[in-house]
Amino acid sequence: MSVPPLRLRPHHILCSLGFEGHGYSDTFTANMEAIVVGRLRAALGDATMVEITATADAICAPCPRKRGQGCEAQFEIDTLDTAHGAALGVSAGERLTWGEAQDRVRARIKPDDLDVICAGCRWLDLGLCKSAVARLQG
Ligand code: SF4
């Protein structure tokens, strides 16, 4: 039986890359830990098939701000997705492996780009996501 692809919003590619245990609730963080650490950063994690979505994804699933397939902060989420989708060159319905998603980041994103595409995110000032992009680029 084949494993279904991991559904991710465009901006959750970079959020997953930079994840270091912060989240919106204990349940949210535990779920993100399972996805990011348990799957994407595990051995063979780069082969994980990802499907880009414009609606609530695997990371959103237990979020206290989720409303149906949307978000109580829909405008902010749509703004992030639009900026990240354009920067990474991904759009809803596209499938790529996690390794290919990281290749997009490596080729198209510089750490300071996050000041623009992540504007308004509460985690930006921690610097973890910029550091993760910098590490990826060696
Ligand atoms: S700064 Fe925020 S939106 Fe940008 S990658 Fe990090 S967690 Fe995601």
Image (tube, rainbow, N blue to C red):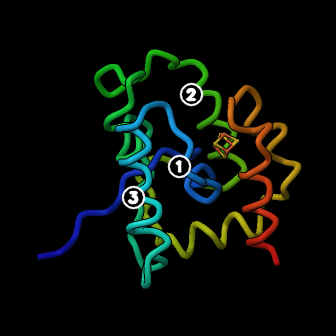
Q: Secondary structure at mark 1?
A: loop
Rendered location of residue 105, percent (x, y): 70, 63
Label tally? 3
Q: Secondary structure at mark 2?
A: helix
Please identify the quadrant where the C terminus is shown: bottom right
Label 3 packing within 10 angstroms: few (<14), some (14-19), many (20+): some
- Which residue does the image show at 64% across and 34% down from the upper left? 80
Tell me the CA gap for discs 1 and 2. 12 Å
Image position of 34 with respect to 87: above or below:
below
**Looking at the image, is mark 1 or mark 3 nearer the viewer?**
3
Image position of 52 with respect to 2: above or below:
above
Q: Which of the marked residues, 1 or 2, is nearer the chain's N terminus?
A: 2
**Looking at the image, is mark 2 or mark 3 nearer the viewer?**
3
Which of the 4 quarters of the picture holds residue 107?
Answer: bottom right
Label 1 packing within 10 angstroms: few (<14), some (14-19), many (20+): some
Which of the 4 quarters of the picture holds residue 108?
Answer: bottom right
Picture disc at residue 78: 2
Residue 73 horizontal side relative to residue 58, left or right: right
Residue type at mark 2 is: Asp
Label 2 packing within 10 angstroms: few (<14), some (14-19), many (20+): some
Tell me the CA gap for discs 2 and 3. 22 Å
Image position of 94 with respect to 24: above or below:
below
Depth order, front residue of 126/113: 126
Depth order, front residue of 107/37: 37
Q: Which residue is mark 3?
A: 35
**Residue reaching furthest to the left:** 1
Residue type at mark 1 is: Ser
Residue type at mark 3 is: Ile
- Which residue does the image show at 44% across and 76% down from the upper left? 42
Rendered location of residue 129, percent (x, y): 72, 52
Q: Which residue is mark 1?
A: 91
